[in-house]
Image: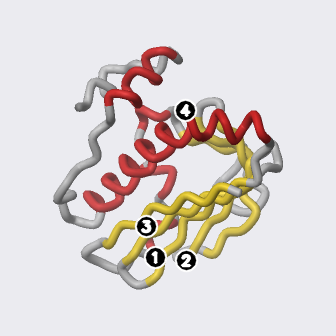
Amino acid sequence: MVRNVHERELPVPAGPFVDRIQELWPPQWGKQEFDRPLGVGADGGHGPIRYHCTEFKPGESITFAFRSGEGSHTLSASGNVLRHELIGHFRLGTRLRWALVTRWLHDACLEDLLDNHERAAGREPSAPARWSLWVRLVRRAFGLVSSQSARV
């Protein structure tokens, strides 16, 4: 099993920011789009990552299941803390891809997302996310280079 957690303390209550995930999604990671308004049953994702919404409690949490059926990810709020948790029950090939490539891209994407949430909450992140050399190389190898991806 893979468990990956990212948290950010905001200067205000985090609840309203759960509902703003699409608005604050970092565009350099592919637009987050769904086939209907965000809520249970919405099907979509970002770039090649496909998932559907299985639970949505406005102002509290939103959970998406991967279309592959291999896991889920949840954005939730508790007090001033915004938390993203990915739980994966990956097959061997997916576990290897996660360890070598996906995890690094996922971590960079989530830190960019949490930076955007923090800015929207009225505070510049004290240590804004920076992409590692590995993330930049992998993005380039997969043709994900954009004008915004030159961040170091």
- The structure residue drawn at horizontal position 71% and vertical position 57%, both measured from the top left corner, is 1
- Disc 2 to disc 4, C-alpha distance: 30 Å
Mark 2–mark 4 CB contact (< 8 Å):
no
Mark 1 sits on what residue?
15
Contact (CB < 8 A) between labels 2 and 3? no
Which residue is the site of mark 4? Answer: 101
State which tag comes first along the sequence, 2 or 3: 3
Figure check: 141 above or below 122: above
Q: Measured from the top left, where is residue 137 in percent x and y?
A: 40, 21
Badge 1 amino acid: Gly
Q: Which residue is mark 3?
A: 17
How many neighbours does mark 1 have within 10 angstroms: few (below 14), some (14-19), or many (20 or more)?
Answer: many
Contact flag, marks 3 and 1 (Cβ < 8 Å):
yes
Circles 1 and 2 in contact, beta carbons < 8 Å: yes
Q: Could you say where residue 135 lies in the image, as x and y percent from the top left? A: 40, 30
> How would you rate the neighbour count of disc 4 (Cα within 10 Å): few for under 14, some for 14-19, many for 20 or more?
some
- The amino acid on which the numbered mark 4 sits, given as a three-letter code, is Val
